[in-house]
Image (cartoon, rainbow, N blue to C red):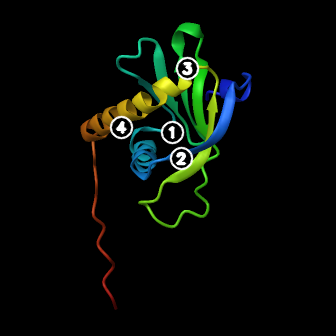
Amino acid sequence: MYTRHNEVPIYEHRAGLIEAAHYNRVKTAFKRLGREIRLVIPRLKTLDLILQQDAWIIVDRAFNDLPIAAWLDFEVAQRDALHTAVHCQLRLFHANADVVIKRALEAMELILEERLANAETTHQVLNFPERK
């Protein structure tokens, strides 16, 4: 489990907002692909996105997985609809982190969609027991 986003000094932090489609896709991926997912972000040479239950972190693998940006403290306790955005905290660890955030989320969406489509889905329908 990656924890450096809690150890490295923060450049800037602010309130963040994750679109419902992104949040829901990641939750589905956790159920089908595992509890921790690491994605290589295309066209961003050494950046990866680590998805964990409590945080999504963009890291630079060329610098020993130094965090670039992280979304955490997802406010889902009061969430009562799947179509509403999720409030969170956004931590930036680099002065230019804003530049890669949008591209990282777009890449995440495409990669997870592909992985979920290719994942073996073995669904089984359970019949209700007969009434007596």
Q: Residues within 10 Å of mark 2 (few under 14, many from 20)?
A: some
Q: How crowded is mark 4: few (under 14 residues within 10 Å), some or many (20 or more)?
A: some
In which quadrant of the rendered image does the C terminus lie? bottom left
Question: Which residue carries the number 4 mark?
Answer: 109
Question: Which residue carries the number 1 mark?
Answer: 35
User: Disc 3 residue type?
Assistant: Asn
Callout 1: SS: loop
Of 28 and 13, nearer the camera is: 13
Q: Label 4 vs label 3: CA separation?
A: 22 Å
Question: Which residue carries the number 3 mark?
Answer: 96
User: Disc 1 residue type?
Assistant: Arg
Q: Of the two numbered discs 3 and 2 on the same chain, state the one appearing first in sequence.
A: 2
Look at discs 1 and 4 and give the one toward the viewer. Answer: 4
User: Disc 4 residue type?
Assistant: Glu
Question: Which residue carries the number 2 mark?
Answer: 17
Q: Label 1 vs label 3: CA separation?
A: 29 Å
Callout 3: SS: loop
